[in-house]
Structure formats: C-alpha cells, structure tokens
Amino acid sequence: MNPWAGLYTLTKVYFLLLIFQIGFALLPLSSAAQNRYDILITEFLPDPSPPVGMPESSFIELANRSVHDVNLRNWKISNGKTTATIRSDYILRMDSLLILCPSSAQTTFSSFGAALGIGGFPVLDNDAGEIMLISDGGNTIHAIRYNKEWFGNILKASGGWSLEMIDPANPCTGKSNWTASVSQQGGTPGRKNSVQATQADADLPSLIRAVSMDSISLILIFDEALDSSSAADISNYSVSDGIGSPVNATTLAPFYDRVLIRLQSPLVRGKIYSVSVTQITDCAGNEIAINNSCIAGIPESPRAGDIIFNEILFNPPPYGADYIEFFNRGSTIVSCSGLFIAGRDVNGTLKDPLSLVKEDRYFFPGEYLLLTEDSSWIIHNFPQAPPSQILSMPALPSMPDDLGKIVLLDAMGALVDELDYDHHWHSPLLATEEGVALERISPDLPTSLASHWTSAAATAGYGTPGYKNSESTSADISDSDWISANPKIFSPDMDGYQDFLFLDYHLPDPGFIGSISIFNIYGLTVRKLANNIIWGTSGSFRWDGLDDNMHPLPTGHYIIYVELFLPDGRIRKQKLVCVLAKK
C-alpha cells in the first residue's frame, strides 16, 4: 500500500471537515432560545419627552440570558395592538444586550450600545401598556404589563426616564422588580442597569378574581406569572355548589398570569360561587397560600339605581388625587366593562364618557369600588383602603372644587346614577374643605339631595375610600351606652398590656361635632383629646396617659368629659371615669 495515498486521503478529509465547519459558522444561527425568559426585556422608555440625557425616542432593551447565541430574524416585538418584525439577521450573543428602537433612532442609540432599528416600532403607552417579545416560532419569550406607578416617582413618570429591571434572575415578578432609572442620563440603554441588584422572589402567588367567558368557562386572574405545569393540574381547583374540579385548565399567554378552566356543569345566572385554588406555584417555585379563593358568577346589566355614587373627593390636598366611590346596592353581578363615567356641562350635555376598565372585572352585590388617577396615594394615605377595590384610571371627569355633575352610564348609554354635588354640603364647621371627602349617609336615599350627604369624619382621616363610610347611618343608640372607656384601669408603661385607654363610640346620626377633655381630680384640664372635630357614626379615640405637652401624668383617677352637638341643636354629653396606674 502506498503510504502517501493514505496521507493524501486523511488530509483531504481534514480539509473537507474544516471547510464544512467554516461554512456552518458563517450560516445564520437558528433561534435556539424558545423558552420563557431565555431573552428578557430589561429596560424600556415609554415616554421620551422631555429628554434627560438620551435620544428623544422610545426604546426596549433585550438581554440574552440563555446558553445560546440567537438569531433574532423574524422575532417580533408588540404592544398588544401593533407588532413589528425584525426582518434582518441579527445575532444576539450570550450575556449581551441589544437596544431595539425605531429605525430613525438607530444611529443616535448606537452611541449607547449595540442598537437595532425596526420599521414600525410599536408605540409605548406613557401611562400603562404592554410589551411582548415573541420568537420566530410564535412563542412568547417575555411579556410585561406596566403602568406609570412602576416608576415610584411622580416626576420621573412624567417623561424622560426609563424603567429598569432590578433583578434579571427573577424575571417573572412584576411591579416589585421594576423601578425608575437612577442614571443621570435618565436610563442605561445597552449597559448594566443602574438599579440592578439581587432581589429574591419570596412573594406567594395570589388569586385576584375570576371572569366568566360563558356558563362553563372561567378565567382565573392571578397577581403574577405562574408555572404552567402546576397551573394545568385540575385537582388544584375547586368550584363551590357541587361543581368541583374543572375538566381542564390551561395557562394563557402572553403573561401566564391567567388560567382558563372548563367546568363540569354550568354556572347558574344570579348565583354567586366560590373558586378555591391550592398547590399551584409561580415561576420562582413559590406555592400559593392555603385558602386562596375568589367569588365568581355570570354578570348582568345593571338597572337604574343598582350602582350608586357613595363617596367623592373633589378637592384633594396638594399632591393628592380626586376619587369617586361606588356601591353595588343591587342583587346582581355587574361587569365593569359595561360601565362608563362622564361629567355634564352647565347645559346638561354629557362630556366624554370614560370606560371604567380596559380589561374586564366584576362588581358584586355589597361591594365598594373606587376610581382614582393615583391609587398609590390612596393606599398610602388610607391604609384601610383595599387595593383590590381600587381601579386606577388615566383620567377622571372634571370635578371642580365648588360644584359639579357626574353620571354613571351603562353600555347602552342609559343612566345608572347621577350626582350633582355642591361644596356647601360639607359641614359648616370645617376649618377647610381641602382633603375632606363627601360621604353618602344612606344607600337607600336619593343621590342628589344635600341632606343625604355630609363630610367624612376626622376620626377616619376625612375619607373612607373603598370601604364603609364613616358617616353611614346606624341603629338608634341609647343615651347611656353610646360611648365607653376600655379598660377602665390602664397602665401606660409600654409593657404590651393595657398601655392605652380606648374610647369607643356609636352614634345614631352622622354629622356630630365634638370634643373630649380629660380632667384630673382637682378639676384641671390635663389633655384635650379632641377639639370640635367631625365624628363618624362609629369609631374610637386613644389616650396614651400623656398631657397636652406630651409629658407622663401621675397615677390616679381622671374624668373624661365628652360633648357633642349637631348643627340642628341636638347635644350629647357624657362623663366617664378611669384610673391611670403604674407598676
């Protein structure tokens, strides 16, 4: 055998392999990343005006966190309404970033980092919107639903600042993993995020509400993205009234925070059901809490007077927000997507009716529902306000500080309720009307009568948004038991046992103005606990054993004198005795 012939054959094979490898490397890579969160949206600029230090154009930053280089050809970016497709080859390397932007802004963004201009780049809504990254195979790789409250800063939310992801290792968390950039340029496109930090996801997923598609189909809405396999287990769901577990359960793209369940038997119109969920997990592996449930049913059109105006704040404090509260006093479930709110001008003409919601939610009998432009302000200033009962709206109808007209309409434009308010409905004894809500006294009385409204109680923080009014009517209370002191012997030594004296009261009518004075055994006033403030129909005051100068008082007996009056001349007075003790 010729040894040179064997060498020639081996050399030929080597070169053929080398040519094949070189040729394969020159071919465009396929989209190897097809799994959720392989590529992330890690930063975006919804409102570029006024610019801080970046181009005056929206952008979306992508980060490749997979173990593959990925060709983005035919990948799509969408805002839920319009979708743009990447038409050219672009290899996004492992552990690298890419700025997606309109074609016209590619050159300017290239000075910040790798940038790719896209024709038809989707418009990012300034106030609230969606962004979806979709692979060439049609899989949703990452999707977010944002609003301006994610900024956590009202000035930065007004434009020029980007939203940055805090911890890319926990991409399925929502608002808690995003905040406004702290870079002096307003953002960090193409670079490590200015707010990047480790932030483990320890929050348990929670079931928020249910929406019926028809009598046998429910969409369950959760507060974060779920693990699809656990969410698909039908044994993790149960519907009350004998319906039991569903036939099947499917997690819905693009946000994976919704599960469609098909029921074994149909829901009955007019009936309210309970849906319970157990053992499902979020994408970080956190399991839902025990006894997680919500109510469900089939909605119906409201009749006039079923949904009523129950409380309004039209003269908020500086940096505060207007709000409108409704109460469902009817017996039917109402779909909020079929409700509209509007103002009336001086001629009675409706002005720009606004839909209450973009995505459907139900309003159940006996529930309160609050509309506002700033839910974070509401929650901060009224800790009792239930977030689940608050609807954030981009805008409310104009509500002047003196008087105005607002109406609630159904989907056909029929009147459900109307309120013609006047600031003179406030208590005449208020030092200022700013920051004080008007509350309806009774849900059973006509809406637009001055005598059926009054100022919210000072003891309730001058408002009760999303929960029972401080000035709602109550049953008649006898003269002897309308206020009580508990405990009658208290020891303010901060040992955790009876450190405070509580004065609990219940009144038969709203609108009382009153004072509480505390005297020592010599008849000297030592503490003015309340001084001519508006009281609710029920509430509580707390005494900590200090005098008006915030100094501790000596042990002994003290007399509590309470005096209330109504503008119509009715007066209530009560004396109580307590003992301040110390160890």
Image (spheres, rainbow, N blue to C red):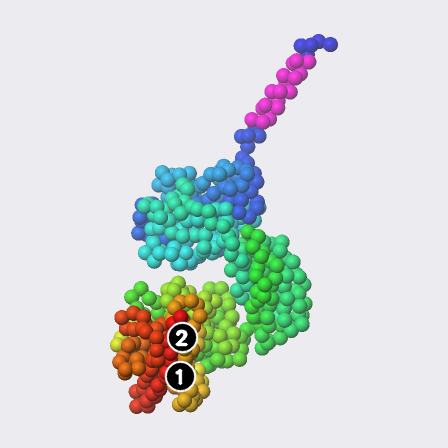
Task: Measuring from the top left, give residue 273's x and y in whole percent.
Answer: 60, 72
Identify the residue under disc 2. 490
439 sits to left or right of 367: left
Residue type at numbered disc 1 = Ile
Snapshot quadrant of residue 482: bottom left
Question: How many angstroms separate mark 2 from mark 1 (CA)?
Answer: 17 Å
Residue type at numbered disc 2 = Phe
Task: Measuring from the top left, give residue 53's x and y in whole percent.
Answer: 31, 45
The one of 579 and 26 positioned closer to us in this rendering: 579
Residue at (41%, 44%) from the top-left corner? 193
**Earlier residue among tags 2 and 1:** 1
Snapshot quadrant of residue 323: bottom left
Q: Which residues are magenta?
A: 6-22
Task: Measuring from the top left, give residue 538's x and y in whole percent.
Answer: 41, 80
Q: Determine if the magenta segment contains residue 208.
A: no
Identify the residue under disc 1. 483
